[in-house]
Amino acid sequence: MAKVLLVAASGLARETISSIEQTGDHEVIGLLDDNTALHGTLIGKVRVLGGLELAKERTEKLLICAGKGSSRAAIAARLDLDDSRYATHIHGSAALGSSVSVGCGSIILAGCVATCDISVGRHTVLMPQVVLTHDNVLEDYCTLAAGAKLAGRVTVGHRAYLGTNAAVREDVQIGAGAVLGMGSALLRDMPAEQVWAGNPARQIITSTNLESTGSRA
């Protein structure tokens, strides 16, 4: 059982702690977060040991638990560590086919299904009950919220976010940094850095403007 440190004291960190407790694939021995007010406190029974600078001083594997893909990307760039320093967590109830590959640092929570010939990138998060079907490609730092479903041959770009229960038609390309709102049905290609929602989904705003408001679709 590998020992891991979680980076970022977030809701995703608490979910990951719970998932690891259920699966037993790792032992979470601490959290790292730059918020000094959290240092020494407990998050889901796990103590916050200090700031991110400790990551380079420790030898444990790491999981970056910031909720946004852009935040995970920024933390990974700041730490500048070899991929070998990162763990991968897959909940025991997830059903992944033998031809599914999962990149380092990724977190796959309970009830996810990935059928065949699927590539999940580095530091990607699949929340509970996500369904991936044949020939999907998820690039690094994607986030798929609970219940999101992809038909075949869908590509999801770097840092893209798919909301709860979003559904994507086969052969659709989702650009880097795109945000698809909860419950949306995406029937055509979605450009990078845009926010779409609805059934069928259509553009609402650019994701750059959305990030500046501090909100999510």
Image (spheres, grey):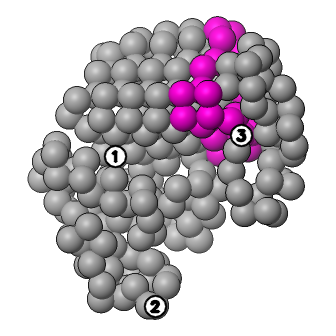
* First along the sequence among labels 3 and 1: 1
Q: Is residue 163 magenta?
A: yes
Q: Residue at x 49, y 82 (%)?
A: 34
| C-alpha separation, residue under disc 3 versus residue under disc 2 | 31 Å
List x then y, in percent, for residue 206.
86, 45
Q: Is residue 205 left or right of residue 103?
A: right
Q: Which quadrant is home to the C terminus?
A: top right
Please identify the quarter of the rendering in which residue 10 is found: bottom left
Magenta range is 158-183
* First along the sequence among labels 3 and 2: 2
| C-alpha separation, residue under disc 1 versus residue under disc 2 | 27 Å
Dot 3 amino acid type: Val
Q: Main secondary structure of the magenta part?
A: loop
| Circle 1 residue | 88
List x then y, in percent, for residue 115.
39, 13
Kindly state the secondary structure of the residue where label 1 is placed.
loop
| Circle 2 residue | 36
Q: Residue at x 49, y 10 (%)?
A: 134
Dot 1 amino acid type: Thr
